[in-house]
Amino acid sequence: MTDVLLCVGNSMMGDDGAGPLLAEMCAAGAPGSWTVLDGGSAPENEVVAIRAMKPSRLLIVDATDMGLDPGEIRIVDPDDIAEMFMMTTHNMPLNYLVDQLRDDVGEVIFLGIQPDIVGFYFPMTEKIKAAVEVVYQRLAGWEGNGGFEAL
């Protein structure tokens, strides 16, 4: 069975680049058994590829405004994404993506990293870089929710 890591975000918008930074780190060698996809700001473009892989587990990582301190990381129930008025810089809300994939994926896990600054041409903050490093380190031995708290 395949595990897929879908990294989401826009690297030109400060902390929204958390997902692409994780994909870049994994490009040098994805920890564990993850197949890594950089969905950028249009993760819906990866739907066909994900369906073809029929992963047992899909982990979506994105900068997500959850009202927490910058750099905090939480597991978000995919069913709650639409109801939470989450900030999104993507072409399509992520709940639509999740809904499209439910029948083809065994388990969908949504991991949010609380951003600080999201704006064009802002650099990524150190707290978000550190949070991405934490996620990267936990990928190799990922079990359940990776040791992250639920929102």
Image (tube, rainbow, N blue to C red):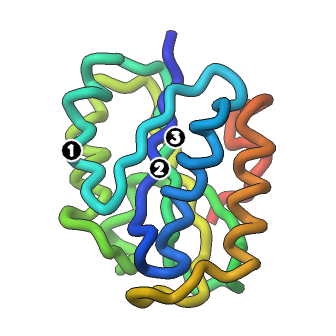
Q: Position of residue 96 (x, y in %)?
A: 22, 53
Q: Earlier in the sequence, mark 1 or mark 3?
A: 1
Q: Position of residue 130 (x, y in %)?
A: 78, 67
The kind of residue on which mark 1 rests is: Asn
C-alpha gap between disc 3 and disc 2: 8 Å
What element does badge 1 sit on? helix
Labels 1 & 2 near each other (Cβ < 8 A): no
Instruction: Examine the rendered structure and indicate whether residue 148 appears above or below residue 48.
Output: below
Residue 59 - label = 3
What element does badge 3 sit on? strand
Q: In which image quadrant can residue 27 be found? A: top right
The structure residue drawn at horizontal position 76% and vertical position 30%, both measured from the top left corner, is 140
Q: Residues within 10 Å of mark 3 (few under 14, many from 20)?
A: some
**Mark 2 highlights which residue?**
7
Q: Earlier in the sequence, mark 1 or mark 2?
A: 2
The kind of residue on which mark 2 rests is: Cys
